[in-house]
Image (tube, rainbow, N blue to C red):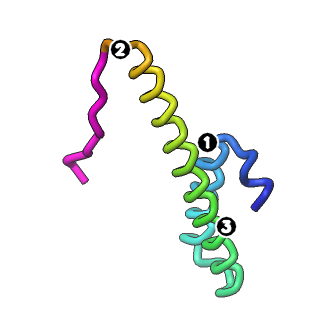
Amino acid sequence: MAADAELSFDLILTRLREAVERLESGELSLEQSLAVYEEGVGMARRGQALLDQAEKRVELLVSASGTVDTVPFHDESA
């Protein structure tokens, strides 16, 4: 997992897509599927942490300019 801390967001997305493809293929054993799933959950959590950090950086930049109010984004389609 320590190596995952160094992954870029784009690489995390790529690896998550690959994990989904492997899981959907139906060619993995139960143990292999669990290992791929576990790795995917870890990558998804790391990706979310990177998004949270980016959001905080943007909020700091916007608030430092003093000209724009920030509001939380709520996706109404979800």
**Secondary structure under the numbered disc 3 in the rendered image:** helix
Q: Quadrant of residue 9?
A: top right
x then y, percent, for residue 38: 64, 73
Residue sitting at 63 percent across and 49 percent down? 12
The C terminus lies in quadrant: bottom left
* Residues under numbered marks 3 and 1 in contact, where contact means CB atoms less than 8 Å apart: no
Identity of the residue furthest to the right in this view: 3
**Residue type highlighted by circle 2:** Gly
Identity of the residue furthest to the bottom in this view: 30
Numbered badge on residue 39: 3
Q: Earlier in the sequence, mark 2 or mark 1?
A: 1
**Residue type highlighted by circle 1:** Phe
* Disc 1 target residue: 9
Q: Nearer the viewer, residue 26 or 49?
A: 49
x then y, percent, for residue 72: 29, 39
* Residues under numbered marks 2 and 1 in contact, where contact means CB atoms less than 8 Å apart: no
